[in-house]
Amino acid sequence: MRRIDVTWILLYLAPLQAQHVRQGVDGQVVDERGSGVEGALIVASGAGFTGWATTKADGSFNLRGAGAFISVRRLGFKPRLIATSDLIEPVRIQLDRVDNTVWSVPSCAALPNRGREWVGGGLRVNATRRRYEGPVYGEHDSHWYFKLNQNTLHVVDGYAWHSGLPLESTLTASQGIKIRGWFFGDIAGLDLSGETKDGKRWRWVGAPLADAVEYKNANPGVADYFDKIVETMCFHSP
């Protein structure tokens, strides 16, 4: 299988069709020595929860469905994001050990005033001196919105709101995608960002299920402003 290292490296991708043909994927996740990596979370875009799997003791996994991309994350390793069109049988995905590109998210309780000015659910951002709307409650979720011009930074806490990745349409419309990992305790998260062919930027920072912070279709100046908010992120653990 051709290796694609995407940790803070821009991927120059030909634009993919948003309605990618769904397919199942069987494979193995290994470390640098070729040993199987147990407990890695595999999440595919565009497939809902048919695109979720956890590796077994030998690193093997089975996805019942997959769209244009699969992501792989595991504590102690740098995450991967791979276009399914680049997967070659037998599928064998190598993870490299964690380095300084994977950032540690602090506990909100360790911040000034125990983070009481931060907003969100699990993932929280600093709202000090910034205007926002929320919480806005849905059936199983809560939302906060920071608006600048016509763009919105969205903070969400809610079971299965995002299925572990940004929308596939966001990923496939990107000229390039950068991937960075983050962790808190035993949670391994993703920090994905990209740019469309017309120069608009997006970013999605999320935990496997309930929590995410994201913006889409932002001009560079607005994206820089939202990035400063994202970088204040902490994790609230009851």
Image (cartoon, rainbow, N blue to C red):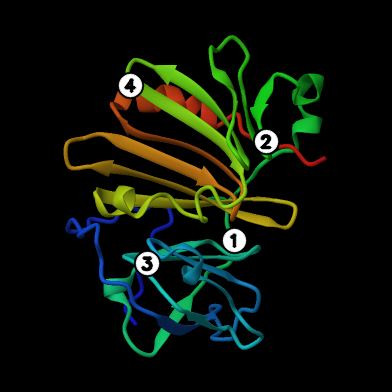
Q: Distance between the residues labelled 4 and 2?
A: 27 Å
Residue holding disc 4: 221
Q: How far apart are marks 3 and 4 (CA)?
A: 29 Å
- Could you tell me if the residues under marks 1 and 4 are in contact, i.e. CB atoms within 8 Å? no
Q: Residue at x 56, y 37 (%)?
A: 156
Among numbered discs 4 and 2, the one appearing first in the sequence: 2
Give the amino acid type for the residue marked by disc 4 in the picture: Gly
Q: Quadrant of residue 149?
A: top left
Residue holding disc 2: 121
Q: In this view, does 45 lie above or below 203?
A: below
Among numbered discs 1 and 2, the one appearing first in the sequence: 1
Count neighbours of disc 2 (C-alpha within 10 A) and say few if under 14, some if 14 to 19, many if 20 or more: many
Count neighbours of disc 4 (C-alpha within 10 A) and say few if under 14, some if 14 to 19, many if 20 or more: few
Q: Which sits in the foreground, 77 or 236?
A: 236
Q: Which residue is drawn at 17% across and 58% down?
A: 14
Residue holding disc 1: 98
Please name which of the two marks, 3 or 1, marks the residue nearer to the observer.
Answer: 3
Specify whether 46 is left or right of 126.
left
Count neighbours of disc 1 (C-alpha within 10 A) and say few if under 14, some if 14 to 19, many if 20 or more: some
Under tag 4, what secondary structure?
helix
Residue holding disc 3: 82
Give the amino acid type for the residue marked by disc 2 in the picture: Gly
Give the amino acid type for the residue marked by disc 1 in the picture: Val
Among numbered discs 3 and 2, the one appearing first in the sequence: 3
Among numbered discs 1 and 4, the one appearing first in the sequence: 1
Give the amino acid type for the residue marked by disc 3 in the picture: Ile
Q: Is residue 192 above or below residue 88?
A: above
Among numbered discs 3 and 4, the one appearing first in the sequence: 3
Count neighbours of disc 3 (C-alpha within 10 A) and say few if under 14, some if 14 to 19, many if 20 or more: some
Q: How far apart are marks 1 and 2 (CA)?
A: 27 Å
Please name which of the two marks, 3 or 2, marks the residue nearer to the observer.
Answer: 2
Percent coordinates x, y for residue 184 in the rendering: 70, 49
